[in-house]
Image (cartoon, grey):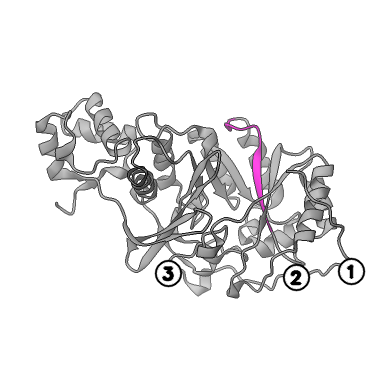
Amino acid sequence: MTNQAANLLGLDLNGLVAFCEQLGEKRFRAVQLYRWIHQRGVADFALMSDLAKSLRDKLAGVAMVEGLKVLTEQRSADGTIKWLFDVGNGDAVEAVFIPEDDRATLCISSQAGCAVGCRFCSTGHQGFSRNLATWEIVAQLWFAEHMLRKERGSDERVISNIVMMGMGEPLQNYAALVPALKTFLDDHAYGLSRRRVTVSTSGVVPMIERLREDCPVALAVSLHAPNDPLRDQLVPLNRKYPLEELLAACRSYLTAAPRDFITFEYCMLDGVNDSVEQARELVRLLKGKVSCKLNLIPFNPFPQSGLKKSSREAVQAFAQVLIEAGVVTTVRKTRGDDIDAACGQLAGEVQDRTRAATRMTRAPVTVHRPAKTLPSRPPTP
């Protein structure tokens, strides 16, 4: 195979049609090829029996279907599976499969590392190396879906939901992200509905607006604070795109979104953002401003963060304030923490290529200790 061979995992259907047209082939041949790759998981052109032999011969010289090398696989007691994929030059990224009774979700990475540097996220503390190519994003699903089918001895689809919540900020890798999303959605590939594909962002406002126009899927926003000063500390990107701009972008996104709400992720940090008063401040920030659901996430500690997990009582009290105010609120169940596969724990292996001079300064996070015990009332599911 020549170095110029195109990895077809990196092409959405329109891209594959254009590629085949360059070979003198019609659209229906591209559709056949697309189905072989994604629906059947076949990488060898010689095995694609309904393709004309002349096309198979052409493809053998100019194209390939090649996934990522799996470095490790870890399986949690709760059924969660984490894979570490080699993406070259000393970098590795992680993807996590999370089975549940009513769905099976794959959490996919979009970058080797992350440049945003959220204080509670292990990925950000590893620094940033590079964006993943489209084929590297798609290859995580391609591998997981077809490996799980083979393991189960079935041709039935296994993965029902995709969340772009792995390593990296997806909207800072927009050019590679959108073709990957289109492959996830295409009926000739994985056929997932827009409601079941979620992009999670720390708040890259211009790209939220572009995604609304180009490929509106479900949107999750890493919020984590009820005001700008605190969010500036926890999510440095807030200094560029403060809450007022972010919420305006979310309202606009809803005009094209497949769901009638935005999911706001809120990592619960002991003494930092988990007080009852901060819950009330969050209600004032959101209620009547944007249709939303709050997802409260237990913090998964790691040594470099200097942060602690909120107590169960604090999480319950915080949730109760939101619920009583009419804000739909859930407390995320931690999955895969015994294999470091839970939210905020994905770190992979990253050769940090960011320069210290260009990094955002990390000021200490102010910790506010409550003067009295918070009330303990269980949240409504």
Q: Earlier in the sequence, mark 2 or mark 3?
A: 3
Res. 3 in view: yes
**Numbered disc 1: secondary structure:** loop
The region drawn magenta spans 256-267
Return the mark for residue 366. 2
Q: Is there a contact, CB below 8 Å, between mark 1 and mark 2?
A: no
Q: Amino acid at mark 3?
A: Arg
Query: Residue sitting at 52 percent across and 51 percent down?
Result: 165
Residue annotated with mark 1: 371
Left or right: 297 as drawn, with respect to 170:
right
Q: Which mark is residue 353?
A: 3
Snapshot quadrant of residue 240: bottom right
Looking at the picture, how far across and down is residue 119, in whole percent?
A: 62, 66
Asked if residue 88 is positioned above or below residue 6 in the image, the reply reads below
* Nearest the eye: 313 or 13: 313
Circle nearer the viewer, 2 or 3: 2
Does residue 94 show up magenta in the picture? no
Q: Which residue corresponds to the image point at 56% horizontal and 48% vertical from the top-left?
A: 200
Q: Position of residue 32 (x, y in %)?
A: 25, 29
Q: CA distance from mark 1 to mark 2?
A: 16 Å
In the displayed structure, does residue 250 sit left or right of residue 97?
right
Amino acid type shown at disc 1: Ala
Residue drawn at point x = 56 percent, y = 43 percent: 208
